[in-house]
Image (cartoon, rainbow, N blue to C red):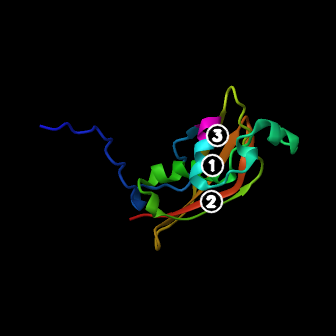
Amino acid sequence: MGTQANTPAPAAVRSFSDVTLGEALPPLTVHVDRARLVQYAGASLDRNRIHWDEPFAKQVGLPDVIAHGMFTMGAAVTLVTDWVGDAGRVVEYGVRFTRPVVVPYDTGADIEVSAIVKSADPETKRVTVELTATTAGEKVLGRALAVAVLD
């Protein structure tokens, strides 16, 4: 008899009736290190040296290597996709990049993400969530809004 891999149960899909205006979503911390940046560079085909070559990043005026903006954006929305239980329910997402995520070689960086429900439309069952993403106490995303459609 073969062995079966243990896989976590899928998250329950959030229903519109379970959402409260002003509700805070459970916070999320995403750790990023140089290895993760190199992996992302390969997957995204964005191999700009500012994301992996420390001497080059400093030469062009950055304090150190920085995370890809799209990596940061994607990491932040994970909070919402986990909360709704189905990434396909997120139908809109936009951010403004306010400052880069600096990723030191020795320690990496943590992206701290929090969010609250800003609006909920009972007719369309669209929920708008405002995200806040910071690293080292500095806000890295502005105007970060995600819209999800729930049942």
Give the vertical position of 111 relative to 46 (above or below): above
Q: Counting other residues with Cα less than 10 Å from the Cα at mark 3, is it few (<14), some (14-19), or many (20 or more)?
A: many
Give the vertical position of 91 relative to 99 (above or below): below
In the rendering, which numbered label is found on residue 41?
1
The amino acid sitting under disc 1 is Ala
Q: Secondary structure under badge 2?
A: strand
Range shown magenta: 31-36
Compare residues 132 and 20 and report the one nearer the observer. Answer: 132
The single residue placed furthest to the bottom in the displayed view is: 123
> In terms of sequence position, does the residue under pointer 2 or pointer 3 come before the other?
3
Residue 35 falls left or right of residue 90: right
In what quadrant of the picture does the C terminus appear? bottom left
Residue drawn at the location 70% of the way across and 38% of the way down: 135
Residue hosting label 3: 111
**x and y percentages locating residue 5 in the rendered image:** 27, 38
The single residue placed furthest to the left in the displayed view is: 1
Quarter where residue 92 is shown:
bottom right
The amino acid sitting under disc 3 is Ile
Residue hosting label 2: 145
> In terms of sequence position, does the residue under pointer 1 or pointer 2 come before the other?
1
Q: Counting other residues with Cα less than 10 Å from the Cα at mark 1, is it few (<14), some (14-19), or many (20 or more)?
A: some
In the rendering, which numbered label is found on residue 19?
none
Mark 1 vs mark 2, CA separation in Å: 25 Å
Q: Secondary structure under badge 1?
A: helix
Q: Counting other residues with Cα less than 10 Å from the Cα at mark 2, is it few (<14), some (14-19), or many (20 or more)?
A: many
Residue 97 magenta-highlighted: no
Question: Is any atom of residue 23 visible in this view?
Answer: no
